Image (tube, rainbow, N blue to C red):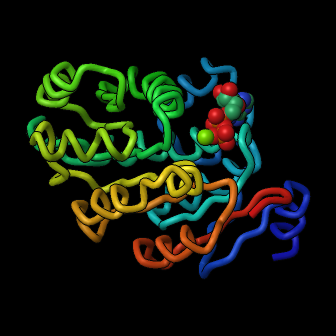
Amino acid sequence: DQEVAEYQKSLAIRVSGFDVPKPIKLFEDCGFPTTLLNAISKQGYEKPTPIQCQALPIVLSGRDVIGIAKTGSGKTAAFILPMIVHIMDQPELAKEEGPIGVICAPTRELAHQIYLEAKKFAKSHGIRVSAVYGGMSKLDQFKELKAGCDIVVATPGRLIDMLKMKALTMLRATYLVLDEADRMFDLGFEPQIRSIVGQIRPDRQTLLFSATMPYKVERLAREIISDPIRVTVGEVG
Ligand code: ADP
Ligand code: MG
């Protein structure tokens, strides 16, 4: 309606797709458990950024999202917070069954940053986060993954290595995030991304974030994402 349209306009949000959930104004509008709201305020996050206002209710509704917003706009929390809720909603399963949330990022620095942010929100919920990227001992990573995790944050190449070594399986994975998809393509990770996506059940929830949407990324998005809602913030894309 008119009020929603004006609110979106005031935040420079554009959306496309059917049945788009309304943007929220406060983290309290998300229906988060108190433990998560406390973790959010502990981070010093007073209110959601524009991409969070629109993406959080969509992701929480279980829909796939293509999110396009510039660096520094708060995309990480837009996919981490609903991931915590998604994991808390799962029935208890044996730890051997692998991560529920899988996040791919282009570089070890980015993977590490996401890992740190995920840990801040996961910790108070007993959710285990592992990071998998080059430059760390493969044996140590193998052992850590074997011990079990709920969220894995990875660069595509190293995640493929770990899957080949059977350090983890994707049997339990139902929430996939491709972060900075355009940079992953620039770095030549398209085959690895396709391989990882192909190992995750098709009824998963898939989120793709990117600062730009070149044709190659758009083509992949169309193949691997179902009925997405596209959220664009600001003058990007
Ligand atoms: P992006 O992935 O879009 O580049 P990040 O998720 O890395 O952005 O967030 C950029 C910075 O903003 C980080 O330092 C993060 O902690 C901070 N941040 C994220 N969400 C909020 C919020 N709601 N309020 C205040 N700071 C936030
Ligand atoms: Mg980011």
Q: Name the image quarter holding the C terminus.
A: bottom right
Q: Residue 193 versus residue 116: which sits nearer the camera?
A: 193
Q: Residue at x 44, y 76 (%)?
A: 226
- From the viewer's perspective, is 49 left or right of 104? right
Q: Residue at x 79, y 61 (%)?
A: 13
- From the viewer's perspective, is 77 left or right of 154? right
Q: Position of residue 101 (x, y in %)?
A: 34, 45
Residue 44 in which image quadrant:
top right
Q: Is residue 230 above or below residue 149?
A: below
Q: Is residue 55 above or below residue 72?
A: below
Q: Position of residue 168 (x, y in %)?
A: 15, 41
Q: Position of residue 23 (x, y in %)?
A: 71, 59
Q: Quadrant of ligand 1?
A: top right
Residue 48 in which image quadrant:
top right
Q: Is residue 125 above or below residue 70?
A: above
One can see residue 34 in this view: no
Of all residues, the one furthest to the bottom in this rendering is 18
Q: Name the image quarter holding the N terminus.
A: bottom right
Q: Residue 15 versus residue 32: which sits nearer the camera?
A: 15
Q: Position of residue 49 (x, y in %)?
A: 74, 42
Q: Is residue 117 above or below residue 5?
A: above
One can see residue 120 in this view: yes
Q: Residue at x 56, y 30 (%)?
A: 37
Q: Residue 142 versus residue 66: which sits nearer the camera?
A: 142
Q: Residue 42 versus residue 160: which sits nearer the camera?
A: 160
- From the viewer's perspective, is 211 left or right of 176? right
